[in-house]
Image: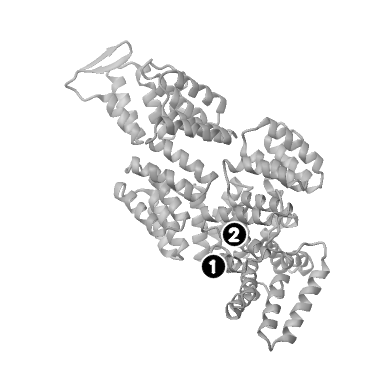
């Protein structure tokens, strides 16, 4: 028999507790069951305020923000359910992008009872999403203090640590989460994904199989297995595993990328274009996605679209060699060899050690077009800073960066931007201060590369080497970092390290298709006197890009070392030097 006391719901002891049933449904993420159980109680005469928080949270779990607001928006809860209700309201406001309102709701939730790990996790997520990434870590620490075995607290801390310190450090927190909650699929997913990034394929597979044993239709587990299969070159298996995910990953960036790559491998370039173009529209500043789109368009034979979409980007200082080749070859396919020549010449001289700060990209152009000189808009401010850097107006860029930093002092993205401006002004120590602050939140290779460049500008090559090695310890599968580390090791005269890192870079990621990396390996092998290995790498580099200055020089040097091909080697070297002399303003790696 249902009894109501002061708006709270109670039950005769002989009957099951429907509130416990709702709470159990919410705990396992079953919003539908929670909603239905709550509405049954309402139909039996229970107080709406006593159930609004529960039903609203159930709607929120289903992704129905409009219905969730009907239950949560008024903030009318009983004293017993107020903390849960305001916590759910905060999550609702955050999902809608109403960050000040979310913060106010979380404050009310904290005022309604003892703080919980879950509330502090969501406060951390709000801070992160609102550009206060440096404060998000404080919230995560508070969550872990309140719930040292709470899977949400451990998962959130693991994510932050993984971003800031690296994969190995983040893995420790996810492992703690799995031990504390061995059936929590969310923390198991992060644990498995991190194992995969570390190259521990067997361990990753073991965890994903455990996930499937708990939930036979778990899309996350099948997606992670599909990624693992694709990395191993088992594309048919990867495609079958992606089918098992249903539509769960159709609109997720990682899923879109994998599906696009699978279509490319299957020869369906047009389908790959559809995948990448949509993602590029949503993430216009994502360099990898734009490169995949350019590649897919070229493979689809749409040279005109490659030129229309990417020529402006290729004209920028930070254009990658591969993009230059794609735009140049596209002009050739369109019958305009004169237009193709500048792009191909620049690609021929590109070197592995070049760094361009803050390439303008399409997002910057769109921001300036949309907001113009309205520098109250952060995106417009960032675009204006990029523009000033491109124009060589370092004072103007520095002034704007300072304003942005004052406005968003806890933003890691702003710290990176301020560091870039300082580095462009050849102030490496000031740049490192900003980069160090940003690294407390997210330390990917793009940031590590900047930190290493700052040390190189200051003639601290050993420090640059250490920064890259620390990153490689945390991210042992990062082939781009390995290639850059090999270049630094070669400059330091550490021939064995250069060869080891170059060999890894040449075998993983884009290395097998990158002539610069293959040339780097050939040089390292030559330094060690290993002619057979050097020949193999030099020939691969020459086959990939015969016209590249560095590649031609390395191949020429190899033929000299081998002997018997001096005339051919000299001809190659003369051609390489003549090509380099044609455009002395372009930097090389020498």
Residue at 33% across, 36% down: 28
Above-or-below relation of 231 to 114: below
Quadrant of residue 115 in the image? top left
Above-or-below relation of 428 to 549: above
Observer able to see residue 539? yes
x then y, percent, for residue 94: 51, 30
Report helix, strand or loop for mark 2: helix
Does residue 123 appear left or right of residue 342 in this picture? Answer: left
Q: Quadrant of the N terminus?
A: top left
Above-or-below relation of 73 to 330: above
Residue 171 marker = none
Q: Quadrant of the C terminus?
A: bottom right
Quadrant of residue 6 in the image? top left
Does residue 402 appear left or right of residue 438 in this picture? Answer: right
Density class for disc 2 (Cα within 10 Å; few <14, some 14-19, many ≥20) is: many
Coloration of the structure image? one colour
Front-most of residues 225 and 136:
136
Observer able to see residue 377? no
Residue at 63% across, 48% down: 447
Quadrant of residue 540 in the image? bottom right
x then y, percent, for residue 412: 62, 39
State which tag comes first along the sequence, 2 or 1. 2
Q: How many marks?
A: 2
Residue 480 marker = 2
Does residue 487 appear left or right of residue 116 in this picture? Answer: right
Report helix, strand or loop for mark 1: helix
Mark 2–mark 1 Cα distance, whole angstroms, equals: 11 Å
Front-most of residues 438 and 214:
438
Does residue 161 appear left or right of residue 369 in this picture? Answer: left
Residue 507 marker = 1
- For the residues bearing labels 2 and 1, Cβ distance under 8 angstroms: no
x then y, percent, for residue 243: 40, 55
């Amino acid at each position: 028999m249902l009894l109501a006391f002061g708006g709270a719901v109670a039950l005769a002891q002989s009957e099951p507790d429907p509130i416990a049933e709702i709470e159990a449904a919410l705990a396992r993420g079953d919003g539908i069951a929670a909603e239905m159980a709550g509405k049954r109680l309402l139909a039996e005469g229970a107080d709406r305020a006593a159930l609004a928080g529960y039903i609203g949270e159930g709607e929120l779990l289903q992704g129905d923000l409009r219905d969730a607001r009907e239950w949560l928006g008024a903030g009318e809860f009983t004293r017993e359910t107020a903390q849960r209700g305001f916590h759910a309201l905060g999550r609702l406001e955050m999902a809608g992008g109403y960050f000040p309102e979310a913060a106010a709701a979380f404050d009310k939730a904290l005022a309604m009872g003892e703080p919980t790990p879950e509330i502090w996790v969501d406060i951390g997520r709000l801070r992160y999403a609102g550009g206060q990434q440096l404060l998000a870590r404080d919230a995560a620490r508070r969550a872990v203090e309140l719930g040292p075995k709470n899977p949400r607290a451990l998962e959130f801390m693991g994510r932050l640590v993984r971003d800031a310190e690296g994969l190995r450090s983040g893995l420790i927190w996810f492992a703690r989460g799995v031990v504390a909650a061995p059936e929590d699929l969310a923390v198991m997913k992060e644990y498995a994904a991190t194992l995969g990034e570390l190259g521990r394929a067997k361990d990753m597979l073991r965890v994903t199989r455990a996930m499937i044993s708990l939930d036979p239709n778990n899309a996350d587990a099948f997606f992670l297995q599909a990624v693992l299969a694709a990395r191993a070159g088992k594309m048919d298996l990867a495609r079958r595993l992606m089918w098992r995910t249903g539509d769960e990953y159709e609109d997720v960036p990682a899923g879109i990328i994998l599906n696009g790559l699978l279509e490319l491998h299957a020869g369906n370039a047009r389908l790959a274009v559809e995948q990448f173009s949509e993602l590029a529209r949503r993430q216009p500043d994502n360099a990898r996605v734009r490169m995949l789109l350019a590649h897919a368009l070229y493979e689809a034979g749409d040279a005109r679209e490659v030129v229309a979409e990417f020529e402006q980007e290729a004209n920028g200082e930070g254009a990658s060699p591969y993009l230059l080749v794609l735009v140049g070859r596209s002009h050739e396919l369109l019958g305009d060899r004169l237009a193709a020549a500048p792009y191909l010449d620049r690609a021929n001289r590109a070197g592995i050690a070049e760094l361009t700060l803050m390439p303008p990209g399409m997002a910057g152009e769109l921001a300036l077009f949309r907001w113009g000189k309205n520098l109250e808009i952060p995106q417009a401010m960032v675009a204006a800073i990029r523009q000033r850097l491109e124009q060589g107006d370092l004072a103007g860029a520095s002034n704007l960066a300072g304003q942005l930093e004052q406005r968003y002092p806890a933003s890691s993205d702003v710290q990176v931007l301020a560091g870039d401006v300082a580095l462009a002004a050849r102030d490496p120590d000031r740049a490192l201060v900003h980069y160090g602050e940003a690294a407390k939140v997210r330390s990917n290779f793009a940031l590590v590369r900047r930190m290493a460049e700052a040390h190189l500008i200051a003639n601290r090559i050993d420090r640059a080497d250490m920064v890259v090695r620390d990153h490689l310890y945390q991210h042992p599968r990062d082939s781009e970092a390995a290639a850059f580390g090999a270049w630094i090791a070669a400059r330091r005269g550490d021939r064995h390290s250069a060869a080891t890192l170059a060999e890894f870079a040449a075998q993983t990621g884009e290395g097998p298709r990158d002539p610069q990396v293959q040339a780097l390996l050939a040089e390292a092998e030559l330094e060690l006197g290993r002619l057979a290995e050097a020949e193999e790498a030099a020939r691969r580099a020459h086959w990939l890009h015969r016209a590249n200055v560095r590649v031609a020089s390395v191949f020429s040097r190899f033929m000299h070392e081998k002997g018997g091909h001096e005339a051919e080697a000299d001809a190659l070297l003369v051609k390489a030097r003549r090509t380099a002399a044609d455009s002395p303003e372009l930097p090389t790696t020498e």
